[in-house]
């Protein structure tokens, strides 16, 4: 199965609700590489890279998020794969 890389913007009540930690745990569980960070405008941004089917599963998961999140919009665009393997939480962007 081919791999896919996407850069994602998640909007709504997604900061201060453990969204980044949940994203890291969920992405690692799917075997994805990439990163996640908070943006200054209140959104969360992430890059997911891995098997196309697993990236699609992650996008579905992002629309729900952790229990305290209230996701209103998820936008994904194809991008270059991350330069490193594994998944990390980055500082604010």
Image (cartoon, rainbow, N blue to C red):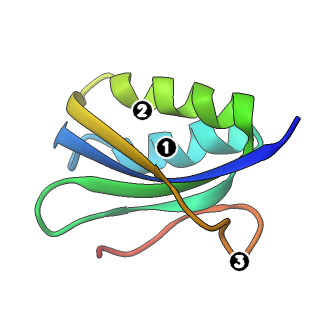
Marks 3/1: CA–CA distance: 19 Å
Figure check: 76 above or below 80: above
Marks 1/2: CA–CA distance: 8 Å
Secondary structure at numbered mark 1: helix
Kindly check if marks 2 and 3 are in contact, taking CB atoms under 8 A apart as contact.
no
Find the residue positioned furthest to the right: 1
Task: Please state if 31 lies on the left or on the right of 37 as rendered.
Answer: right
Q: Which residue is mark 3?
A: 83
* Lower position in the chain sequence, tag 2 or tag 3: 2
Neighbour class for label 1 at 10 Å: few (<14), some, many (≥20)?
many
Which image quarter holds the N terminus? top right
Q: Which residue sits at x=41%, y=45%?
A: 76
In the picture, residue 42 is in which quadrant?
A: bottom left
Q: Which residue is mark 1?
A: 23
Looking at this view, is 18 or 76 the one in front? 76
Q: Which residue is mark 2?
A: 62
């Amino acid at each position: 199965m081919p791999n896919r890389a996407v850069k994602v913007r998640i909007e709504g009540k997604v900061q201060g609700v453990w969204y980044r930690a949940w994203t890291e745990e969920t992405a690692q569980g799917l075997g994805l590489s990439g990163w996640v960070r908070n943006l200054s405008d209140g959104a969360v941004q992430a890059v997911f890279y891995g098997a196309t089917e697993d990236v699609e599963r992650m996008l579905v998961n992002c629309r729900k998020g952790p229990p305290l999140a209230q996701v209103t919009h998820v936008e994904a665009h194809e991008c270059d794969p991350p330069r490193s393997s594994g998944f990390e939480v980055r500082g604010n962007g």
